[in-house]
Image: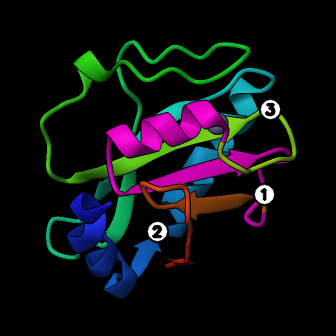
Amino acid sequence: MGFFKKNKKEEFQTKWEIKKECLEFILECAKSSYPNEFGGLLRVDSINKHTIIETVILPGTVSGETHAIFRFNMLPIDFSIVGTAHSHPSVSFHPSDADLLLFRKYGKLHIVVAYPYTLSSWKAYDYNGKEINVSIL
Ligand SMILES: [Zn+2]
């Protein structure tokens, strides 16, 4: 656990924000992928590094019936990417075991959106699956 100590403190002090149109884009993608899952990456602003401004859809992202699969070998080396977003074809936005493995592997902020994909059916998590507060801009 000592390995995570520094990050934990940093995230505790971090105030994350997401542009409303970016969140709406994720919700739209989730809706149109339903009943399959949608997966994408979250990009922050180059100056406001805790403000998510864009969702990047990975080439080769597999949207399957069970879980969105991110191809880690396709991930760009891009420091403006802070984490992932994906949808659940159910009303649960709780991360699954597979989600937690993904969260721990990559990024510091992860958004899960759940059916019916409205502005109140999503949550954000840190690398450890702990809920994070993200304000909508
Ligand atoms: Zn999931």
Residue 19's disc is 2
Q: Residue at x 46, y 68 (%)?
A: 19
Q: Is residue 29 magenta?
A: no
Amino acid type for the residue under numbered disc 1: Thr
Specify whether residue 49 is in view. no
Amino acid type for the residue under numbered disc 2: Lys
The residue to which callout 1 is attached is: 118
Q: Marks 1 and 3, Cα distance to the nearest angstrom? A: 13 Å
Q: Is residue 103 magenta?
A: yes
Q: Is residue 61 above or below residue 37?
A: above
Q: Is residue 78 above or below residue 67?
A: below
Mark 1 and mark 2 lie on one chain; the one further toward the N terminus is 2
Q: Is residue 19 left or right of residue 93?
A: left
Q: Secondary structure at mark 2?
A: loop
Residue 52 place in picture, x, y as percent: 37, 63
Q: Is residue 113 left or right of residue 89?
A: left
Q: Residue at x 67, y 38 (%)?
A: 96
Q: Which quarter of the rendered image does ligand 1 occupy? A: top right
Q: Residue at x 46, y 69 (%)?
A: 18
The residue to which callout 3 is attached is: 89
Closer-to-camera residue (56/7): 7
How many neighbours does mark 1 have within 10 angstroms: few (below 14), some (14-19), or many (20 or more)?
some
Residue 105 place in picture, x, y as percent: 34, 38
Mark 1 or 3: in front is 3
Mark 2 or 3: in front is 3
Corner quadrant of residue 124:
bottom right
